[in-house]
Image: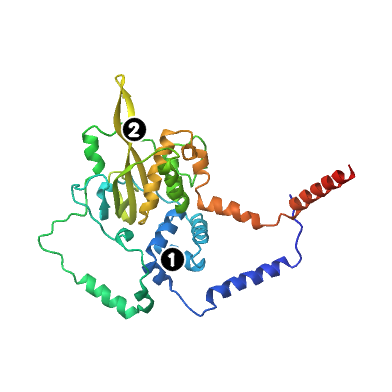
C-alpha cells in the first residue's frame, strides 16, 4: 500500500524534533545521568527488566533522553541492545547462592535464616513527605553519614549468603509435586522467534521482559477469579546474584559480576488423584526479574502457573498472554495508528458515501 506524500514533511519533522529538544530543556533545569542512576532505583529496575539489558547507566541515559517516558526508554534500550554482539551465555545460576538484601515469606513466620525485611515501601504510610521539597545535597550527605555510622551489634550472626529455600522444606516433606528434572537447554526468544506451543523457558523469558503493568494486571485477574488461583508466597528473595561465563573449561567459569535480582516462588494448592482418592499438594509458580520489582515477580509466578497447567480463561491462553505483554509490541502497534492512513480511510469514506447514495435513491 502506498501513502500520499505530504509536501514539506521532512521540514516539519525536523521542526518537531527541535521542538521536542526544547521541551526537555525549556525550564533551564539539568538532571545528570548519575543523579538519575543514584535516585531512581525503581524506575531503573523496571526499564532494565523490560528491555532485557542490565545496565544502570544506560537505563538512566534512556530515562533522561525519553523525559521519563517508560515505553520510550525501553524502546531505546531494546534498540541499543540489538546492536550488541552476543559473546557468551552465562552458566546456570542458583538463587540459593544470592547475597540477600531482602527475604520474606508469607507462608511461614519463622524460616531458617530469618525474615530479612531489607529496604521496602511496604511498611510506609502512603503520605506525601513534604520535607523532601526542602531537601538539599547537604542534607543528603548528612543523612548518609548518619546511617552508615550505625554499628552492627557484635553478637549479630545474620547470614546473608547461601540461605536455604523455603521450598526445600516442603519438598522434603513430600508436599510439593515432583516432576522429572528438565535439563533441556533454554530457548532464547531474542535470537529465535517464538512459536506456539511454547516451552516454559520461552514463557518465563517473555513474562520477565513483559510490561510490568500488564503482567501485574494478568496476575490480578488470575488471583481474582479468572483461573481461581490463589497462591501463598513461599519466598520473595531480592539480592545480588553472581554471574559466571565459561570460556574453555566448563568446570572453571569466570566471575564477571553480579546483578540485582528479584525471585519469587509461590505455592499453589492443587488436588491430585492418587490411589482412587484426591490428595492436596502444592504446585510452584515462579517469577524473576531484574532489580527489585516484587509485585511483578509475584504476578509473574501466578501467570507462569496458569500457563503451565492450562485452562479455559484468558490467562491460561499462552497466545493471548505472551503476544500481549510485551512493551514494545503493544506500544508499537497502538502507536502505529498515528501514522498516515489516508488511503485506507478515504476508501472507507467512498464506500460509505456510495452506500448512503444508493440508500437515498431507493
Above or below, 342 against 190 in this view is below
Q: x, y percentage for residue 186? A: 41, 40
Dot 1 corresponds to which residue? 60
Residue at figure coordinates x 43%, y 50% from the top left: 216
Q: Nearer the viewer, residue 58 or 133?
A: 133
Dot 2 corresponds to which residue? 270
Residues at marks 2 and 1, CA–CA distance in whole angstroms: 43 Å
Q: Of all residues shown, which one is farthest toward the top?
A: 276
Q: Earlier in the sequence, mark 2 or mark 1?
A: 1
Q: Secondary structure beneath disc 2? A: strand
Residue at figure coordinates x 49%, y 34% from the top left: 197
Q: Is residue 142 left or right of residue 86?
A: left
Residue 139 tag number: none
Q: Nearer the viewer, mark 2 or mark 1?
A: 2
Q: x, y percentage for residue 93? A: 31, 46
Asked if one can make out residue 245 in the rendered structure from this viewpoint, the answer is no
Above or below, 181 against 286 in this view is above
Q: Secondary structure beneath disc 1? A: helix
Q: x, y percentage for residue 176? A: 28, 34
Do the residues bearing badges 2 and 1 touch, measured as CB atoms within 8 Å?
no
Q: Of all residues shown, which one is farthest toward the left?
A: 155
Q: x, y percentage for residue 191? A: 49, 45
Quarter of the image for residue 19 reads bottom right
How packed mark 1 is, by other alpha carbons closer than 10 Å (few <14, some 14-19, many 20 or more), is: many
How packed mark 2 is, by other alpha carbons closer than 10 Å (few <14, some 14-19, many 20 or more), is: some
Q: Of all residues shown, which one is farthest toward the right?
A: 361
Asked if one can make out residue 255 in the rendered structure from this viewpoint, the answer is yes
Quadrant where the image shows the C terminus: top right
Amino acid at each position: 500500500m502506498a501513502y500520499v506524500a505530504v509536501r514539506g514533511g521532512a521540514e516539519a519533522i525536523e521542526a518537531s524534533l527541535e521542538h521536542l529538544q526544547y521541551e526537555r530543556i525549556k525550564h533551564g533545569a539539568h538532571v545528570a545521568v548519575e543523579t538519575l542512576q543514584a535516585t531512581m532505583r525503581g524506575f531503573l529496575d523496571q526499564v532494565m527488566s523490560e528491555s532485557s539489558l542490565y545496565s544502570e547507566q544506560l537505563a538512566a541515559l534512556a530515562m533522561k533522553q525519553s523525559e521519563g517516558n517508560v515505553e520510550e526508554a525501553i524502546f531505546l534500550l531494546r534498540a541499543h541492545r540489538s546492536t550488541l554482539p552476543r559473546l557468551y551465555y552465562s552458566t546456570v545460576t542458583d538463587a540459593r547462592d544470592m547475597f540477600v538484601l531482602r527475604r520474606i515469606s508469607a507462608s511461614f513466620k519463622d524460616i531458617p535464616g530469618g525474615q530479612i525485611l531489607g529496604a521496602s515501601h511496604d511498611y510506609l504510610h502512603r503520605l506525601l513527605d513534604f520535607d523532601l521539597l526542602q531537601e538539599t545535597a547537604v542534607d543528603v550527605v548528612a543523612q548518609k553519614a548518619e546511617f552508615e555510622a550505625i554499628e552492627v551489634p557484635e553478637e549479630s550472626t545474620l547470614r546473608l549468603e547461601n540461605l536455604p529455600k523455603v521450598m526445600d522444606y516442603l519438598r522434603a516433606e513430600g508436599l510439593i509435586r515432583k516432576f522429572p528434572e528438565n535439563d533441556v537447554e533454554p530457548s532464547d526468544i531474542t535470537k529465535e522467534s517464538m512459536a506456539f506451543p511454547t516451552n516454559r523457558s520461552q514463557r518465563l523469558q517473555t513474562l520477565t521482559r513483559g510490561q510490568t503493568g500488564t503482567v501485574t494486571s494478568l496476575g490480578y485477574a488470575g488471583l481474582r477469579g479468572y483461573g481461581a488461583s490463589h497462591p501463598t508466597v513461599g519466598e520473595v528473595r531480592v539480592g545480588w546474584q553472581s554471574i559466571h561465563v565459561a570460556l574453555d573449561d566448563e568446570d572453571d567459569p569466570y566471575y564477571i559480576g553480579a546483578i540485582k535480582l528479584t525471585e519469587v516462588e509461590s505455592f499453589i494448592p492443587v488436588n491430585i488423584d492418587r490411589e482412587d482418592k484426591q490428595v492436596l499438594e502444592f504446585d510452584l509458580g515462579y517469577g524473576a526479574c531484574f532489580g527489585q520489582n516484587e509485585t511483578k515477580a509475584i504476578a509473574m509466578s501466578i501467570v507462569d502457573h496458569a500457563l503451565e497447567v492450562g485452562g479455559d480463561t484468558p490467562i491460561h491462553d499462552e497466545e493471548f498472554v505472551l503476544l500481549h505483554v510485551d512493551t514494545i509490541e503493544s506500544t508499537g502497534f497502538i502507536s502505529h495508528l498515528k501514522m498516515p492512513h489516508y488511503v485506507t480511510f478515504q476508501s472507507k469514506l467512498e464506500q460509505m458515501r456510495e452506500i448512503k447514495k444508493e440508500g437515498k435513491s431507493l
